[in-house]
Image (cartoon, helix red, strand yellow):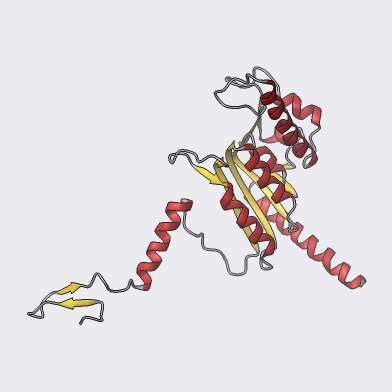
Amino acid sequence: MIGGTVLTNSNNETPIPNEDAPPKPNDQKDMSIVEKIQQLGQTNVPASNDSKIHCLTIIGQIEGHVALPPQNKTTKYEHLIPQLVAIEQNPKIEGLLIVLNTVGGDVEAGLAISEMIATLTKPTVSIVLGGGHSIGVPIAVSTDFSYIAETATMTIHPIRLTGLVIGVPQTFEYLDKMQERVTRFVTKHSNITEERFKELMFTKGNLTRDIGSNVVGGDAVKYGLIDDVGGIGQALSKLQELIDERKEKSNKEENEF
């Protein structure tokens, strides 16, 4: 049969596959899954139809203006920004949970992500699992409430150009201004003071190959960097609490009018 999906030989024996036949729906679905794995490293996670909380994961190294080697586990900021816009516009999503386990990465990309999260109108909660290092710190504190696992760590250190020597004053001034941007953002969106944050940033002897501090779990809370120590259960409960508070406030404002 020429118009069908298979052909037969002259003796009507074993069917011969027709390479020109259109792909079946199942074949298209399999191709779509393969493409998602190649581009994002994962397939869509099945979500409950009545769930109003979106989970956004930021793992590995944050990739910005420069493409990283293919063997690096990365989170691309050009993938996150459209998701954040969609979350803000989607009326079915009432809250955002951000799960962090990142070594840091591109400073400007990290700050852009942090600013977008901080300006969302919907309730947001972050949780640091494993690590929230370097530019991951501003992302962790950009939410309405932040958690850190008891064994998780956060590395605080100055901005630098890895492997390069700062040889001209203009480069130093540029990095210094960028460092101030990070410091202002972190101190504005957390309870840590600027003096304490800079003290942790420029500590010597804490890190083997760098200056700075490695802050573990409860210490991050003690310094005012993170709001509380907890896990995924506490983070989801807090997010639901913030969602309920937002609804109550909205209903109250409507009744006043």
Return the residue nearer the eye: 80 or 126. 80
**Do we see residue 229 in this rendering?**
no
- Find residue 192 and report its horizontal and vertical position in percent: 79, 34
- Find residue 247 and report its horizontal and vertical position in percent: 79, 65
Q: Quadrant of residue 211?
A: top right
Return the residue nearer the eye: 36 or 48. 36
Q: Quadrant of residue 184?
A: top right
Q: Residue furthest top?
A: 205
Q: Residue at x 25, y 80 (%)?
A: 4
Q: Quadrant of residue 10?
A: bottom left
Return the residue nearer the eye: 155 or 157. 157
Q: Residue furthest left?
A: 11
Quadrant of the image containing the C terminus: bottom right
- In the picture, measured across the screen, residue 50 lies left or right of residue 19, that is right
Q: Residue at x 76, y 39 (%)?
A: 185
Quadrant of the image containing the N terminus: bottom left
Return the residue nearer the eye: 82 or 203. 82
**Do we see residue 116 in this rendering?**
yes
Q: Residue at x 18, y 77 (%)?
A: 7
- Find residue 8 and report its horizontal and vertical position in percent: 15, 78
- In the picture, measured across the screen, residue 57 lies left or right of residue 192, that is left
- Find residue 254 and report its horizontal and vertical position in percent: 87, 71
